[in-house]
């Protein structure tokens, strides 16, 4: 029995020795050499301001006591106060008020510009009348020249008939005689007996009220603003009524014109009732004691019955305050016979009292002055000669005809 136990113990010792050798050999096995790993570069995030408990301690600066602060004496503080304006909340500077150019003789001063674009009519007529033999073909060319200039069929025929008679009686035709003859006949055609003054005085205690009408694209709002400059230049105080509520930024455009000359603009919401705004403008003009109220209406197509009816409503509402002293129809001088069609329809809705011809500087069709006056029986009172703020001029027949004929 003892021999058996001894054998088991020897066997266990042998097994343990063998296991130790195996483990020891495994530990001594060398792994293949590897390259040492590179050290990664770590970029620190930018420093952020710290608040609260994480805030860095502030540098302590020496502080003065109340006794060390020197205050100005009472006399200095009262005599030289220093105002400090906050650049952020300071008020915007008021717009500079412009001084418009005086209106007296304005068309005469602008005559050269008008002549450059208009005198092709006068030169053409003088060239034809200077021919040695004035046969039927020549007179037909004279008629064609007048028709192209939009003088109109009936006025053209009248002018040609008078020219033929006077040239036949005159006999000799020197350049000076022809120029004088043509000037006389054109002046007769344009008309010198019209009252071309823009009526801006009501004759009662209310301001003079002027309503400006026309189709889209004729320069109606610009004309209203320029007319305000004309009136201010003549010493009149003006209130503007922005009753064009359909065109985007029309009220802004009119207010810009008014701000330039110190005229107040009455306006309402976009798409609002034009009659209500016109009524308020006249009301404010009365309250302020203004001399003139100018009402800019929306551009209306003469083929749209509803819009034209609304224009009549504006007129009726304004007249509740008093008489409407002037209704100016703005026409584009380049539209020719289409402008006459527009004029007829507007005259049926409101009583047109005067015509404003715009864009007269860019066309040789000065004869539209004659045609539109014949069509409506009302005078051309103002003409637009360019894009400048002072290029709206009172119409003067003599200066206009001189520009047509040229030097």
Image (tube, rainbow, N blue to C red):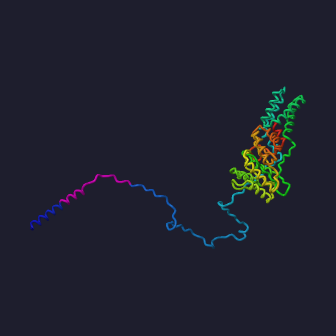
**336 w.r.t. 275: above or below:** above
Whole-percent x and y of residue 26? Answer: 23, 56
The answer to whether 39 is drawn above or below residue 175 in the figure is below
**Nearer to me, 71 or 288:** 288
Based on the picture, tell me whether residue 24 belongs to the magenta stretch: yes
Give, as a single range, the part of the protein colored magenta.
18-38
Q: Quadrant of the N terminus?
A: bottom left
Residue 115: x and y in percent read 79, 38
**Is 139 covered by the magenta stretch?**
no
Quadrant containing the C terminus in the rendered view: top right
Residue name at image x 85 percent, y 56 percent: 204
Numbered marks: total: 0
Q: Nearer the viewer, residue 66 or 87?
A: 87
Whether residue 160 is situated above or below residue 328 in the rendered picture: above
Left or right: 152 as drawn, with respect to 269: right
Q: As drawn, which residue projects farthest toward the bottom?
A: 67
Task: Give residue 362's position: percent from left, percent from top.
Answer: 75, 40
Image coords of residue 157 (percent x, y): 83, 34
- Residue 218 can be seen in this image: no
Residue 323 placement, left or right of 68: right
Q: Nearer the viewer, residue 369 or 85?
A: 369
Q: Residue furthest right?
A: 169
Query: Is residue 72 something one can see in this rendering?
Result: yes
Q: Is residue 112 left or right of residue 56?
A: right
């Amino acid at each position: 029995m003892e021999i058996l136990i001894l054998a088991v113990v020897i066997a266990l010792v042998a097994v343990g020795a063998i296991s130790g050798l195996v483990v020891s050999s495994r530990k001594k096995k060398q792994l293949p050499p590897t390259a040492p790993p590179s050290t990664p570069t770590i970029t620190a995030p930018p420093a952020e301001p710290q608040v609260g408990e994480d805030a860095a301690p502030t540098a302590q600066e020496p502080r003065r006591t109340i006794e060390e602060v020197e205050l100005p004496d009472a006399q200095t503080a009262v005599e030289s106060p220093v105002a400090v304006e906050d650049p952020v909340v300071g008020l915007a500077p008021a717009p500079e008020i412009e001084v418009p150019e005086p209106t007296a003789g304005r068309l005469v001063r602008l005559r050269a510009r008008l002549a450059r674009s208009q005198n092709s009519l006068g030169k053409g007529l003088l060239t034809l009348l200077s021919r040695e033999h004035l046969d039927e073909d020549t007179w037909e060319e004279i008629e064609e020249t007048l028709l192209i200039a939009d003088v109109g069929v009936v006025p053209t025929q009248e002018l040609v008939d008078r020219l033929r008679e006077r040239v036949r009686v005159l006999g000799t035709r020197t350049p000076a005689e022809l120029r004088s003859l043509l000037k006389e006949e054109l002046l007769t055609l344009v008309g010198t007996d019209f009252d071309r003054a823009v009526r801006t005085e009501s004759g009662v205690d209310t301001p003079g009220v002027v309503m400006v009408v026309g189709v889209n694209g004729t320069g109606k709002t610009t004309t209203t603003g320029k007319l305000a400059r004309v009136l201010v230049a003549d010493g009149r105080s003006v209130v503007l009524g922005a009753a064009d509520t359909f065109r985007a930024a029309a009220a802004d455009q009119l207010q810009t014109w008014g701000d330039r000359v110190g005229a107040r603009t009455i306006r309402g919401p976009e798409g609002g009732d034009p009659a209500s705004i016109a009524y308020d403008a006249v009301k404010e003009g009365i309250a302020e004691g203004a001399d003139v109220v100018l009402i800019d209406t929306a551009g209306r197509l003469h083929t749209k019955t509803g819009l034209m009816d609304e224009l009549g409503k504006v007129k009726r509402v304004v007249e509740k305050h008093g008489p409407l002293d002037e209704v100016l129809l703005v026409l584009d001088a380049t539209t020719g016979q289409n402008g006459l069609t527009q004029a007829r329809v507007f005259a049926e809705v409101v009583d047109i009292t005067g015509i404003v011809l715009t864009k007269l500087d860019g066309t040789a069709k000065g004869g539209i002055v004659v045609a539109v006056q014949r069509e409506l029986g009302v005078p051309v009172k103002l003409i637009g000669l360019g894009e400048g703020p002072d290029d709206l001029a009172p119409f003067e027949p003599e200066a206009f005809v001189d520009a047509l004929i040229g030097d």
